[in-house]
Image: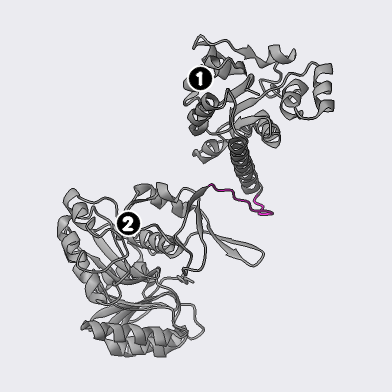
Amino acid sequence: MSISRALISVYDKTGLDQLARGLYEHGVEILSTGGTAKFIANLDIPVVEVSDFTGFPELFEGRVKTLHPKIHGGLLHRRDKEEHVQQAEDNEILPIDLVVVNLYPFEQTVAKEGVTREEAIEQIDIGGPSMLRSAAKNHDAVTVVVDPGDYEGILEEMDKHEGNTTLKTRERLAIKVFQRTSEYDGAIAGYLSGAQETKSSFSISLPLAQELRYGENPHQKASLYGNFGDYFKQLQGKGLSYTNVIDIVAAGELILEFRRPAVAILKHTNPCGVGLDDDDLRQAWEKAFETDRQAPFGGVIVCNRPLDIGLARVISEIFTDVIIAPDFETDARALLQKKKNLRLIQMAEEFSETLDDPIIASTAGGVLVMDHDKTALGLDGIEERVVTNRPPTADEIEAMRFGWRVVKHVKSNAIVFSAKDRTLGIGAGQMSRVDSSRLAVWKAEQAGLDLKGSVVASDAMYPFPDGLVSAIEAGATAAIQPGGSIRDEEVIAAADEHDAAMVFTGHRHFLH
């Protein structure tokens, strides 16, 4: 049976002209409301106002338009049940075979700065989700469309199937509807919960973005949901795995810390080298690479400037899994594309906006939700946080700022030795902070880097003086750490004894 009657009520009118003309050519009667009805009428296409169809006027400034038995009965009655068909005839309820609805822009409204509660409430769509759900429940007979991107496909199916759609398509579209209404309701509940300052529940609904090559290991399946591709566009290379996605995000968050030209190398989300330069990415790369010449093998390289041919020539000689940049110059991309499996990822400027979103992680029976760690010691104020007799020099202050930004992205326990424009030794993820320090010193020795005059950054407090002393003995002349240990006075005394400068930031950077 072909589609004979459609109800269209949309806020976003993208593609509506094409859809309406296509339905008209198929002889479909179109019901509509308000601005949508006017839009269709202006196309010289016959349209029936819902109030005329139901015999009931719109009420309460349009709050009640489609909440009527002739609408929901037309959607919900089963065409394969004689009792349903008879009741519909007895009550003059005509079947509605196609529903096209998209919702008031609640999410966009509440995202605006200064939006009032009243403005937000008025953008809560009631009739739209109700029609969508009724139609989706009865998708055996009713086609329901919530996304303008599906208009063209619907018309193509009607052309191929004598004016109707297939059950498989109707089922797919119904699933899409329930996902969208769930997401919409979640946004409303989240907004109202925030206004109430209550966190009684948490919900999330995201569309499938892509099936990943595998999870943490090849025998594990993994999928990616949401709009990851809006922030990281894959230009070439093998498909992404679960770990690739995690590494890419970690690299992106690290490189956002820097304004000067910067290059970072990561392995398993941990930085293994970071370098800065005033104007040359190649020089920044050399500083990062010198920290650890082994770790980049199969790792991730990220920079905060368009990747040029000079850097491309150097890194093309190394086996690398992923390269991330805001853009790739034409000749650089042409060179890197010779490696067919190499993943080139273009990072969008808008990625920084995602740091306002919560971090969500699965746990037994539920999820953990946490704010991003956006706290950082400002460019000013280090001088007021000095706890030792000797204040840091200007170069030491600059190195502290650099090291503190890097250590924030190293798995705890984390220790970073640095100069003002490069990492010199990194110790990550050890059970003891002293062991992390030893590892960082050993890595510097392996790289042939001198730690004399370096600054050491610790992501959390030194609980005992030994960790700081071992760093000083390795060559560090200054330290930056959160403080907060019951033995802070002993740690400060040890720094003073060795004429080292030390700053307490007042906050830690655990990363698990």
Residue 499 visible, this orientation? no
**Label 2 with label 1: CB-CB less than 8 Å:** no
Task: Please tell me how crowded label 2 is: few (under 14), some (14-19), or many (20+) other residues with Cα within 10 Å.
Answer: some
Image quadrant in which you'd find residue 469: bottom left
Instruction: Kindly identify the residue that appears in the image at 56 percent across and 27 percent down.
Output: 161
Name the residue nearer the viewer: 97 or 198: 97
Residue 109 vs residue 74: left or right?
Answer: left
Residue 51 vs residue 234: left or right?
Answer: right
Prevailing secondary structure class for the magenta stretch in the rendered image: loop
Name the residue nearer the viewer: 155 or 485: 155
Amino acid carrying mark 2 in the image: Gly
Image mark for residue 22: 1
Instruction: Kindly identify the residue that appears in the image at 61 percent across and 35 percent down.
Output: 170
Q: Is residue 417 above or below residue 104?
A: below
Image mark for residue 58: none
Name the residue nearer the viewer: 278 or 369: 369
Task: Please tell me how crowded label 1 is: few (under 14), some (14-19), or many (20+) other residues with Cα within 10 Å.
Answer: some
Q: Is residue 282 above or below residue 143?
A: below
Asked whether residue 199 is drawn in magenta, I would say: yes
Name the residue nearer the viewer: 487 or 315: 315
Q: Give the mark, 2 or 1, whose residue is nearer the N terminus.
A: 1
Task: Name the residue that disc number 2 marks.
Answer: 237
Residue 413 vs residue 45: left or right?
Answer: left
Mark 2 and mark 1: Cα distance apart in space: 40 Å
Provide residue 147's location: percent of width, then percent of height: 53, 34
Amino acid carrying mark 1 in the image: Gly
Q: Secondary structure at mark 2?
A: loop
Provide residue 3's location: percent of width, then percent of height: 62, 22
Q: Which residues, given as a range, are shown in magenta?
A: 197-207
Q: Is residue 503 above or below residue 198?
A: below
